[in-house]
Image (cartoon, coloured by chain):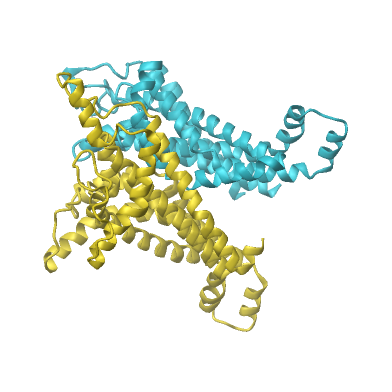
Chain colours: A yellow, B cyan
Amino acid sequence: MRSHALHRLAMTLPTLLVISALIFALLELAPGDPMAQLPDSIPESVRADMRAALGLDQSATVRYALWLRQMLVVEPSVALDGLLGTDLAAGGPRILSWQTRAPVMSLIAQRLPQTLVVVGLAYLIGTAAAVALGVWFAARQGTALDRAGTGMAALGYGLPPYFTAAVLIYIFAIWLGWVPTVYDTTHRVTGWDSAAVQIRQMILPVAVLSLQTTAQITRYTRAAVLDALGQEYIRTARAKGLPERRVLLGHALRNSWVATLTVIALGAPQIFAGAIITEQIFGVNGIGQLLIQSLHAGDLPVVQTVTMLIAVLIVLANLTADLLIARIDPRSTHA
Amino acid sequence: MRSARKLRLGVLLLAVAVALVILGPLLWTLPHDAMDLGARNAPASLAHPLGTDQLGRDLAARLFAGGRVSLAVALVAALVGTGLGLAIGLAAGMSRRLDGPLMRLTDIFLSLPLLPLLLIAATLFRAPLASALGAEVGVFTLITLSIGATSWMSTARILRADVRSVMQRDFIAAAQLVGIRPARMVVFHILPNIASTLSVSAALAAASAILMESALSFLGLGFPPDLPSWGRLIFEGTPHLGTYPGRSLWPGAMIAITATGVTSLGDTLRAKAIGN
């Protein structure tokens, strides 16, 4: 068990290194020049100075090494300095945005709360609904309810989020006028009234994201609970006269946690990818919108750092899923 | 019984989408990029069954044209992705030496943030490919290749497991004993035995390729307006959702129909493959 965990931990760093090299190489291979938008009247010597100011006069290897050092050493120590008031960073070079010349990490820190509030809440609601629905459909297997529910889940799986968003916006924001169409990120919660406004504007983005999550996870939960319901201990539990509720929640659901938790942990980072689209629809200025805006502006330091951040989240989620399963079901480590 | 009905539903949905896209332009010959500035934002009428957009382009014609692009992308990207997955799955399943490295590669690709990487590739490689191959072919190549290159992993994993179990069977040992060439063994002994898994993977890859392409186009990083795909049409229609909802709802419905059809087809095929 412990050696399995250590093995998995030891594999994480090389994986992240390879991924960072892949991301850097993709950006490096792309032809294109950050100076291309500048007017032709700028003399060549000034252009060379501007390249040097962006650090582009160095070779690709040097820039990759610098980026790694910035992510692994400089930025963590800046974060520590902010927390503890020390001076570990000692003015080391931070990752700077080409567009704003601001540190990329502070751009991310500005954007992350909006993403986390919307995405995190949506994922919580989505998974809670999915587990509840999965158990419910499994308990009523074969009935009209189960068929309708699994049909809806299959539909929700095939419906792209921008389409459900468009339909929901049309019905609830434009037709019924219950909620605003665009998320206002400058809105500050100061009292009950503004909190109500905040909740109303969050309803649609959260609903779109959690619909997607629910559709995907319900299928797995239902299958896992059905699988457990076919086992002999369920017959034993029923034979000794346990109420059906205890059989379902105490025995069937409990034994299907491994499969369900795996899907939940593995799906968590994919939601950040889905958030790129949802943020674009509703105008939430989170991480996804930062990525799209920086891509359009050719701001490569922001693009590669945000992409790497999402990659780190995915790898961490995979690791968590693996360790969780090993903890719940030690048999899996001997397979 | 239930799976038969689901199969029929899948085939029906897919047939509706394909028939609309192929037969539509034969019955409705208006070009999708012809502008009729006298009839901008026209409502549905006999001349324009779905109305026109802000440049007076016929929306029905654009819907058919978009379908051709979306379905072509799905087909080619699924071929590329499944082909890559097949090659890697075969290599990893047949050779013990290649198995470890190839499966590590698959794991790494599975941890990549695919949508951001696709967005990066679609932005940065657009101009050079367009100048090398021409605007339309360039964008098409870029999008199908990048979707294909990021969708082979699950195919490779499933096929590797299948190939391994086929390799354990007696007829493989017999074939090896008579000294069969590897290429011949793949074509005549392995492929027929993994064909059902392969077709399921291809169907699911096609469904996810449609969704991925429309996501790229929806973010404005996919197809240009003169070569519209369904995703591009949604992207163009979303700002007018309040005034002309049909503009994004029709292409959205077509994507939903096609993706649901292909997915339920793949699901039923998979259930059948497991059942057998």
Query: Which residue is situated farthest in the bottom direction here?
Result: A240
**Residue A86 in view in this figure:** yes
Q: Quadrant of residue B94?
A: top right
| Above or below, A329 relative to B194 | below
| Above or below, A307 relative to A44 | below
State the image coordinates of residue B160 (x, y, percent, origin top left): 66, 43
| Above or below, A244 relative to A12 | below
Tell me the residue at 49%/39% (across/down). Answer: B261
State the image coordinates of residue B221 (x, y, percent, origin top left): 32, 32
Tell me the residue at 16%/60% (across/down). Answer: A197
Out of A98 and A202, give the one closest to the viewer: A98
Tell me the residue at 37%/31% (across/down). Answer: B122
Counting labels gives 0
State the image coordinates of residue A83 (x, y, percent, origin top left): 25, 65
Left or right of B162 on screen, residue A301: left
Out of A161 and B258, give the one closest to the viewer: A161
Q: Quadrant of residue A291?
A: top left
**Residue A221 in view in this figure:** no
Q: Quadrant of residue A229?
A: bottom right
State the image coordinates of residue A103 (x, y, percent, origin top left): 23, 48
Query: Which residue is situated farthest in the front direction here?
Result: A90
Left or right of A306 on screen, residue A200: left
Left or right of A291 on screen, residue B80: right
Out of A275 and B21, give the one closest to the viewer: A275
